Image (spheres, rainbow, N blue to C red):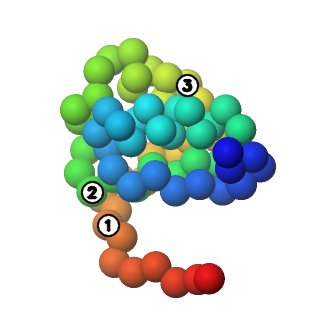
Amino acid sequence: MCVGADVVVVGGGNSAGQAAVFMAQTARHVYMLVRAEPCANNVRYLIRRIEGSPNIELLTNTEVISLAGS
């Protein structure tokens, strides 16, 4: 899934964090878009895995306002 692709995960909860870590195994880059503080609800081990993944980038204070493409 998403092999070699750039991926965007919207949200900072447990499900979003788990998805980001899972997709980071095969994706080129994973961007986590988080409106507030990063992963405020995630458990400690998941936060460490996100921070330890070089291809996961947390973009805080970020909100999706539109999408375009095919």
Helix, strand or loop at mark 3: loop
Q: Earlier in the sequence, mark 2 or mark 3?
A: 2
Measured as percent of width and height from the top left, residue 46 is found at 40, 23
Q: Which residue is mark 2?
A: 35
The numbered mark at residue 63 is 1
Q: Is residue 25 above or below residue 59?
A: above
Quarter in which the C terminus is drawn: bottom right
Q: Residue at x 59, y 54 (%)?
A: 7
What's under tag 1, amino acid-wise? Glu
Q: How far separated are the C-alphas under marks 2 and 3? A: 21 Å
Number of labels in the image equals 3
Q: Are marks 3 and 1 in contact (CB under 8 Å)?
A: no
Seen in the image, is 16 located left or right of residue 22?
Answer: left
Q: Quadrant of residue 55?
A: top right
Q: How far separated are the C-alphas under marks 2 and 1? A: 6 Å
The numbered mark at residue 52 is 3
Q: Is residue 47 above or below residue 38?
A: above
Q: Quadrant of residue 63?
A: bottom left
Q: Badge 2 local density, few (<14 within 10 Å), some, or many (20+)?
A: some
Q: How far separated are the C-alphas under marks 3 and 1? A: 24 Å
Q: Is residue 41 above or below residue 48?
A: below
Measured as percent of width and height from the top left, residue 12 is found at 32, 44
Q: Earlier in the sequence, mark 2 or mark 1?
A: 2
Q: Residue at x 71, y 38 (%)?
A: 26
